[in-house]
Image: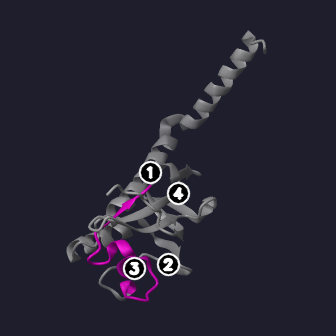
Amino acid sequence: MKKITLASTLAAIAMVVGSTVALADDDGTQYKDLYELKQLHVAFHHAVSHAGIDAATQAKALEELLALWTEDGVLIAGGVTYSGKGKPGTPSCALGALTLCDLYAHHAGGLVLGHDWVSLTPIFTEVVKVLDHENGQIYFQCIYFDSSTDQLKSNVTFGLPGKPDTGRAKKVNGHWLFSHGEVASFAPPTLDVPQ
């Protein structure tokens, strides 16, 4: 049995206290930044859920999604690179414009008119990391569930599993926004629902 001494106990306490103090980042900004990155994730799921129920809801969701991105944001999905936000109602949002507006308006299943999809995430899959006060990494999973048919429709990730630099956020004018993302797509998970 290992003998515990006063010196080893004090050393252990110093390591724990030292770690806590280092994480506190003096004024708590590290924690505030982590919270705001998590809220960015929440805002995404809120915007895409029920977005296709009618044209007005779809338009609002499109605006909300674009507001979550930096002006020069890049998202790579299905081997296609979508660059820059684009603006609804302009050629930058037209089919084939290859902007984020084009992606969400014409290719995102949750925003298709007639789709009443809800985007869920297993929270244990979320990874957020503050690199400094202006740059962060973010990874999360989106499982799309059709609330009108009880079917699982899609399983994608923002960021690639195990590759932290494939989902990034940047602080712009005091707000965290997505700046770069790569999407991985998987077969929808199975769900056993009692009949």
Secondary structure of residue under mark 2: strand
In the picture, which quadrant includes the N terminus?
Answer: top right
**Residue 16 percent coordinates (x, y):** 63, 26
In the picture, which quadrant includes the C terminus?
Answer: bottom left
Q: Earlier in the sequence, mark 3 or mark 1?
A: 1
Instruction: Please state which of residues 129 and 71 is positioned toward the viewer in this rendering.
Output: 129
**Residue 110, quarter of picture:** bottom left
**Residue 19 percent coordinates (x, y):** 63, 32
Q: CA distance from mark 4 to mark 3?
A: 22 Å
Q: Give the extent of the magenta segment.
A: 92-121
Q: CA distance from mark 2 to mark 4?
A: 18 Å
| Amino acid type assigned to the residue bearing label 3 in the image | Gly
Q: CA distance from mark 1 to mark 2?
A: 23 Å
| Amino acid type assigned to the residue bearing label 1 in the image | Lys
**Residue 70 percent coordinates (x, y):** 45, 67
Disc 1, disc 2: CB below 8 Å? no
Q: Is residue 17 above or below residue 89?
A: above
Q: Is residue 109 above or below residue 21?
A: below
| Amino acid type assigned to the residue bearing label 4 in the image | Ile
- Circle 1 residue: 38
Q: Determine if the magenta segment contains residue 114.
A: yes
Mark nearest the camera among 3 and 1 is: 1
